Amino acid sequence: MRADARDNRARIMTAADDVFGRAPGASTDDVARLAGVGIATVFRHFPTKIELLEAVLTLRLERLRDRALELAGSDDPGKAFFEFFTQVVAESASKLAIAEALTASGATAGEEVRAVGHGMRAAFDDLLTAAQKAGAVRADAQFAEVYALLIGASRGATAAGLEPDVRDRMLGILYDGLKHS
Amino acid sequence: MRADARDNRARIMTAADDVFGRAPGASTDDVARLAGVGIATVFRHFPTKIELLEAVLTLRLERLRDRALELAGSDDPGKAFFEFFTQVVAESASKLAIAEALTASGATAGEEVRAVGHGMRAAFDDLLTAAQKAGAVRADAQFAEVYALLIGASRGATAAGLEPDVRDRMLGILYDGLKHS
DNA sequence: AATTAAACGGAGTGATGACTTCGAATATAT
DNA sequence: ATATATTCGAAGTCATCACTCCGTTTAATT
């Protein structure tokens, strides 16, 4: 692959991440303009808008999964769990927007996105069970509802206008519930 | 206003409620088709798509507000609060649009929608403070984060795939956090 | 420096969707 | 029953957006 092509591909991805993170309904032209390339170049690298969105989403999910795997080695499982939870919620605003853009334009997620998403959830599940074994999270909580709370907290944080104070107090209440014996 | 006009207006509103509840990105044509009227009729009653959406949203918010006001007279404030919370979550799970309606009512929304949304939140706030005075909800919780939790729980419930078991366990954890002294 | 194969950009194209127009139809009043 | 004022719906208009075509430019090789 030629050097300029690789360059442009990278620039397009960061531009797309930025644009779709802000406005889920943004057009491909917007991405091209921000990336400083022509529209055709975007479509040459990503044959369809959906593929572009999937690429961006995959990158984000990979980062989260890696972060979870990294924290899995911690010697304080409780701290690791809550730290990951908090980080996901903090980053959620733009990530959710991208996921929304994807569902809005094409609906069903592609093969790769689903695989990485699954990997991320598996890593999160590991964090949860470790924290439960350490007694930092109530033992009767199952993965499904904890994951639902993770997504819900992310949504709630974006809706609350992202004010850090409110978000932290919200998480405080939630964490008390998760610790509750 | 003529009888048939009033009829059509009502049919359009219920159709819109249904259609947009299922697919937020649905077209005006879809609404017209389901309502059994021509497109022009829809636009005559609601000059713009936004106004139609606002009308539907207003109706939903009014129903919720009325339910909150009704529960405000209860002699068990704690039960009233949690009942309302649970109902909002349950309804948004089956009808995706309510959660969206809630977030939308907070941000960019027309005059009327904002007014009704404000009324609904005020009624919910009353339920909260009454529950706190009764000692059923922790006193240090402020409205902003509780409202964020309400929206978040709604979103999380829909994301969890609508399974009632998971939803109830999720709410159980959340309520433990809200009761936590 | 010349060659060439790959990548680039901008001007199309076709489809979709919000909104309008206007002649036909219908409810209400006389 | 007739008149008329209002409402109805099908066929438009216009803008937007995902995606393509093709002549031009540029990176890498000799």
Image (spheres, coloured by chain):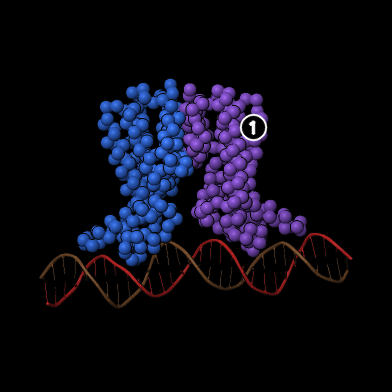
Chain colours: A purple, B blue, C brown, D red
Instruction: Tell me where residue B136 appears, x and y as whole percent.
Output: 36, 24
Task: Quadrant for residue B131, please give it.
Answer: top left
> Could you tell me which residue is drawn at 61 percent across and 55 percent down?
A52
Task: Quadrant for residue A47, please give it.
Answer: bottom right
Residue at mark 1: A71
> Could you tell me which residue is drawn at 58 percent across and 43 percent down?
A118
Front residue of B98 and B86:
B86
Observer able to see residue A56: no
- Badge 1: residue crowd in 10 Å (few <14, some 14–19, many ≥20): many
Number of marks in the rendered image:
1
Instruction: Tell me where residue D2 appears, x and y as whole percent.
Output: 14, 77
**Is B145 located above or below residue A22 in the figure?**
above
Q: Which chain is mark 1 on? A: A
Front residue of A123 and C13:
A123
**Is B109 located above or below residue B74 in the figure?**
below
Instruction: Tell me where residue B51 appears, x and y as whole percent.
Output: 36, 55
Instruction: Tell me where residue C27 appears, x and y as whole percent.
Output: 19, 65
Q: Which amino acid type is shown beneath numbered disc 1?
A: Leu
Position of residue A36 in the picture relative to residue C27 (left or right): right
> Could you tell me which residue is drawn at 70 percent across and 56 percent down?
A8
Task: Quadrant for residue B91, please give it.
Answer: top left
> Could you tell me which residue is drawn at 64 percent across and 52 percent down?
A13
Observer able to see residue A175: yes
Q: Secondary structure at mark 1?
A: helix
Quadrant in the picture for the N terminus of chain A = bottom right
